[in-house]
Image (cartoon, rainbow, N blue to C red):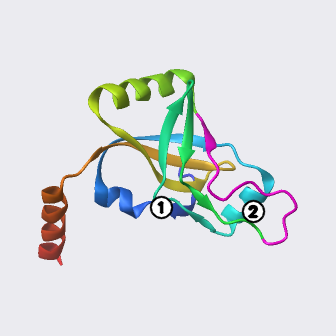
Amino acid sequence: MKENLKTIAQNKKAFHDYFLEESFEAGIELCGTEVKSIRQGRVNLKDSWCSIVDGEMLVNGMHISPMSRAIFQQGSYAVRRLLMHKREIMRLFGLVKQEGYSLIPVSLYFKLPGQGAGGLCKGKKLYDKRSDMAARDAKR
């Protein structure tokens, strides 16, 4: 059975700067005006990253443009909580601390309100980026 996913935003810079080792899916805790802004496509994942603090996964640097006529508005760069099982968070925390990986949001989509996909990523070196560009040029 194929699911309907409405992709809102993708982090293309993450694919340029990191090797995606593993992907995961998480919900995002949002307020009402943020959901409306996201439905309008007014979100940017370009410089966002995830951190784990006190057993909770948080997304930092995700920009959601505020609505013009909203009464209650959270900051556009506010830290938002990701909804995942505690055991998954602790497994990712162990990998990030021991092996030098980063947690990067890769895409934001609506499956249920406010779902997104993230990835366990390892940083690329400059020569890796150059080889990717050379391969892309050769393919073209």
Q: Nearer the viewer, residue 78 or 33?
A: 78
For mark 1, give the secondary structure: strand
Indicate whether 25 appears above or below 107. Answer: above
**Quarter of the rendering containing residue 95:** top left
Name the dominant secondary structure of the magenta segment: loop
Quadrant including the C terminus: bottom left
Residue 17 in the figure: left or right of residue 125: right
Q: Residue at x 72, y 65 (%)?
A: 66
Q: Residue at x 53, y 63 (%)?
A: 9
Residue 80 in the figure: left or right of residue 51: right
Coordinates of residue 137 in the picture (x, y in percent)? 16, 75
Say which mark, if any, is on residue 36: 2
For mark 2, give the secondary structure: helix
Q: Residue at x 37, y 62 (%)?
A: 13
Coordinates of residue 61 in the picture (x, y in percent)? 53, 53
Count neighbours of disc 1 (C-alpha within 10 A) and say few if under 14, some if 14 to 19, many if 20 or more: some
- Counting residues from the start of the chain, the first of labels 2 and 1 encountered is 1
Q: What's the residue type where badge 1 is placed?
A: Gln
**Quarter of the rendering containing residue 17:** bottom left
Query: Outermost residue, right direction?
Result: 71
Q: Residue at x 68, y 69 (%)?
A: 40
Q: Which residues are magenta?
A: 68-83
